[in-house]
Amino acid sequence: VLMLTAQYRYIAIKLSLLFQNSKNRNESRKGHHSMTDRWAKKELRALCRHQNTVLQ
C-alpha cells in the first residue's frame, strides 16, 4: 500500500510539473505547439514506462 501511495504521489508531481512546464513553453513559444506537443508526449511516455517498470 505504501509503495502504491508513493507511486501516486510521484505521478501527481511529475504530471503537475509536466503541465506547468508545458504551459510555460506555450507562453514563451506561441505558434510552436507541435514542438510542445511532442515534448509533452515524450515526457508522458517516459512516465508511463517508469510506472509500468515499477509495477512489474
Image (spheres, grey):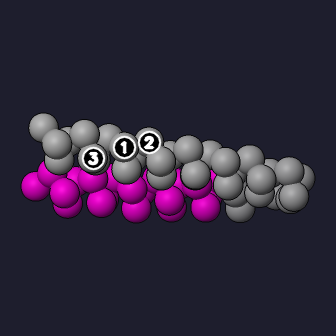
The numbered dot on residue 12 is 2
Q: What amino acid is labelled 1 in the image?
A: Arg
Point 25% across, 39% down: residue: 5
Q: Which mark is residue 19?
A: none
Where's residue 10, x and y in %?
Answer: 37, 50
Would residue 16 be found to the left or right of residue 54 on screen? Answer: right
Residue 35 lies, in percent from the top left, at 71, 61
Can you tell which quarter of the image residue 25 is in?
Answer: bottom right
Q: Which residue is mark 3?
A: 6
Give above or below for 42 relative to 11: below
Most foreground residue, 56 or 8: 8
Q: Label 2 amino acid?
A: Ala
- Give the spatial CA distance, label 1 vs label 3: 5 Å
Q: Tag 3's secondary structure? A: helix
Q: Nearer the viewer, mark 2 or mark 3?
A: 3
Q: Please say if the residues under marks 1 and 2 sit with CB atoms less than 8 Å apart.
A: yes
Find numbered disc 2 in the image and state the secondary structure of the residue it sits on.
Answer: helix
- Tell whether 36 sits left or right of 1: right
Residue at label 1? 9
In the displayed structure, 44 sits above or below 42; it is above
Residue drawn 61% across and 61% down?
39
Which range of residues does the magenta coloring cover? Answer: 37-56
Residue 21, given in percent of the width and then of the height, sits at: 67, 55
Crowding at mark 1 (Cα within 10 Å: few <14, some 14-19, many 20+): few
Element marked by disc 1: helix
